[in-house]
Every structure is written in C-alpha cells, then in structure tokens.
Image (tube, rainbow, N blue to C red):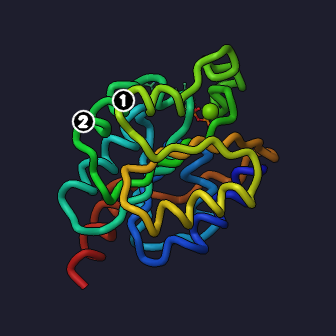
Amino acid sequence: MLRFEATQLVLKHAGNRPIVSNLGPTTDELWHAGHRDRNFYTYGNMGLCSSIALGMAVSTGEQVISLDGDGSLLMNLGTIATIGREQPKNLIVIVWDNEQWGQTGHQASHTAHGTDLEQVARSCSIEHTETVRDLESLEGALLQALEQEGPWFIVAKIEEAGYMPVSPIEPEMTLYRFRNSFKE
Ligand SMILES: Cc1ncc(C[n+]2csc(CCOP(=O)(O)OP(=O)(O)O)c2C)c(N)n1
Ligand SMILES: [Mg+2]
C-alpha cells in the first residue's frame, strides 16, 4: 500500500475532523492529497505528532486523527502509554509504518527488527488496535474507528513511491488557520 493512496483514503473519510501529520513526507503527502484548514502539519519535530493529537482530543469534543511515523513514534513511545492511561475516546492514531527512518536515508527502524507497535499499544491498555497491509483493510479499520469509541491505534504497513515536492507550509500559518477553523 502506498502511503499517498492511504493518505487520500483517510482524507476521503475524515470529513472536517482535525488531522495531525508527522514531519516530512507524511506532511507533504497530506498537503498534496488535500490541503485544508484542519490539517495540522508538524514540522521538524519527531515524536510529538500523536502527543499533539492527544492534547487536541482531550481539549475538544471532536474526533482527532494522528498520522504518525514509525521512526518518530519510536522516539517517544511514552506517548502510547499516556494515550493508554488517558483513554481518549475520540483519538485515532494511524502509524505509517515503512519500517524505516525514511526521510533521512531509509535506515531500517526497530519495526524492521521485531518491534511490533500494535503490541506496544495493547500492552498500554489500548484495546482497539489493528495492523493493516492494504487499502481495503485500512478502510475497514478506519470506518470502524470513526464509528466506535476509541482510543484507536492502527499500524499501517506502507511503501513509498518517491518523494513529492516539499509542501509550502509555514508553522505560524498552520496554527493560525487551524485555530480559526474551530471558531466557525
Ligand atoms: C529529534 C529529531 N531527530 C532527528 C531528526 C531528523 N529526522 C527527520 S525525519 C527523520 C525520520 C523520520 O522517520 P519516520 O517518522 O519513520 O518517518 P518517515 O521518514 O519514515 O516517513 C529523522 C531522523 C529530527 N527531525 N528530529
Ligand atoms: Mg518511517
């Protein structure tokens, strides 16, 4: 499954829900798949995408979708434990797991060497988890997650087909647009 196609699929079903995206290609592909005010693009940081989404989930009544990355999440596994402790019903974490730190040279990450992020989530009391390897299964898991209370943790094994042009995002504008979208 290509991450770009998977991203398009998520957008197709997301409606107006906030989506937080991991740095680099995940953010670029979300921008190309469909720039919208409720996309919260992260930039430069690793390991904070799902933490930011968790903060949004506990402070709004809306369902929040996090598009995280395996390498980044491995840098802050504690966020999974915090999600398990807080049990936000309205948080859906999707991890684009290409089993590598893609952007910095495709170095194999721990998920290529036995770390199973779905099992990590389960051990942190997150009951609704899936690992999906194709678009059909991703769509099934996502539709379930949108209907049933979470937290949800979906590991999507993905591939990349080269990188798209870097998205023209400005962190300040992302924050401005995103905050304003809650006032409408
Ligand atoms: C704290 C920190 N360390 C290192 C980097 C450099 N860096 C940028 S992207 C990246 C890899 C991210 O891996 P992953 O989250 O799996 O996303 P992928 O590139 O595979 O899509 C690294 C190491 C960074 N931005 N921040
Ligand atoms: Mg990766």
* Disc 1 + disc 2, Cβ < 8 Å: yes
* Figure quarter occupied by ligand 2: top right
Q: Name the residue: 44% across, 32% down.
A: 122
The vertical placement of 104 against 151, above or below, is above
* Left or right: 81 as drawn, with respect to 13: left
Residue sitting nearer the eye, 75 or 171? 75
> Disc 2 residue type?
Arg
Q: Position of residue 133 (x, y in %)?
A: 74, 45
> Disc 1 residue type?
Cys
* Left or right: 142 as drawn, with respect to 90: right
The vertical placement of 6 against 13, above or below, is above
The residues bearing labels 1 and 2 have C-alpha atoms spaced at a distance of: 7 Å
Query: How many C-alpha atoms fall within 10 Å of the one at disc 2: few (<14), some, or many (≥20)?
Result: few
Q: What is the residue that sits farthest to the left in this orientation?
A: 59
Q: Position of residue 89 (x, y in %)?
A: 30, 56
Tell me if the residue at label 1 has its CB under 8 Å from ligand 1: no
Residue sitting nearer the eye, 88 or 43? 88
Q: Position of residue 170 (x, y in %)?
A: 41, 56
Residue with the mark numbered 2: 85
Q: Secondary structure at mark 2?
A: helix
The vertical placement of 78 against 67, above or below, is above
Residue sitting nearer the eye, 105 or 62? 62
